[in-house]
Amino acid sequence: MDAHIDRFLSYLSVEKGLSRNTLSAYLQDLQKFVAFAEKRGILRIDQVHRREIFDFFSELRSRSLASSSMTRMLSTLRTFFKFLSSE
């Protein structure tokens, strides 16, 4: 999954001109999702389905993560998967 994330971050930097801080936030969000997926035995991006995303957000909610952080993570994942589907 790391190669996909690297391409995504490069796209955001080059094509979208996002700041270093924004790219760092995207990377942290994606790393959290990847760690969650790997704990469930998901090692490839094509193994990720809606259920895993719902479960990821359920786990975040159980940790009492701020709604603004959850919104940012949702935006990160939505943008990431949209990027992947357009590739």
Image (cartoon, rainbow, N blue to C red):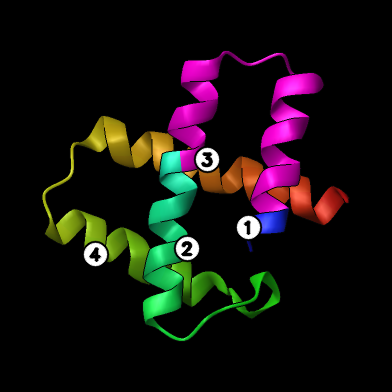
Quick one: SS at disc 1?
Answer: helix
The residue that disc 2 covers is 34
The residue that disc 3 covers is 76
Residue at (57, 13) in percent of width and height? 19
Q: Nearer the viewer, mark 4 or mark 2?
A: 2
Q: Main secondary structure of the magenta part?
A: helix
Quick one: SS at disc 4?
Answer: helix
Q: Earlier in the sequence, mark 1 or mark 2?
A: 1
Between the residue at mark 3 and the residue at mark 1, the CA separation in whole angstroms equals 15 Å
Q: Nearer the viewer, mark 3 or mark 1?
A: 1
7 versus 40 height, above or below: above
Q: Quadrant of the N terminus?
A: bottom right
Dots 1 and 2: beta carbons under 8 Å? yes
Between the residue at mark 3 and the residue at mark 4, the CA separation in whole angstroms equals 17 Å
The label shown at residue 82 is none
> Within 10 Å of the Cα at label 2, are there few (<14), some (14-19), or many (20+) other Cα atoms?
many
55 versus 24 height, above or below: below
**Residue 9 position by quadrant:** top right
The residue that disc 4 covers is 59
Q: Earlier in the sequence, mark 4 or mark 2?
A: 2
Residue at (54, 17) in percent of width and height? 20
Front residue (pair 58, 80): 80
Query: With 60 as the anchor, is 8 left or right in this view?
Result: right
Q: How many marks?
A: 4
Q: Disc 2 marks which amino acid?
A: Val
Q: Nearer the viewer, mark 2 or mark 3?
A: 2
Q: Disc 4 marks which amino acid?
A: Glu
Q: Bounds of the magenta span?
A: 4-27
The residue that disc 1 covers is 2
Between the residue at mark 1 and the residue at mark 2, the CA separation in whole angstroms equals 9 Å
Q: Is residue 19 magenta?
A: yes
Q: Disc 3 marks which amino acid?
A: Thr
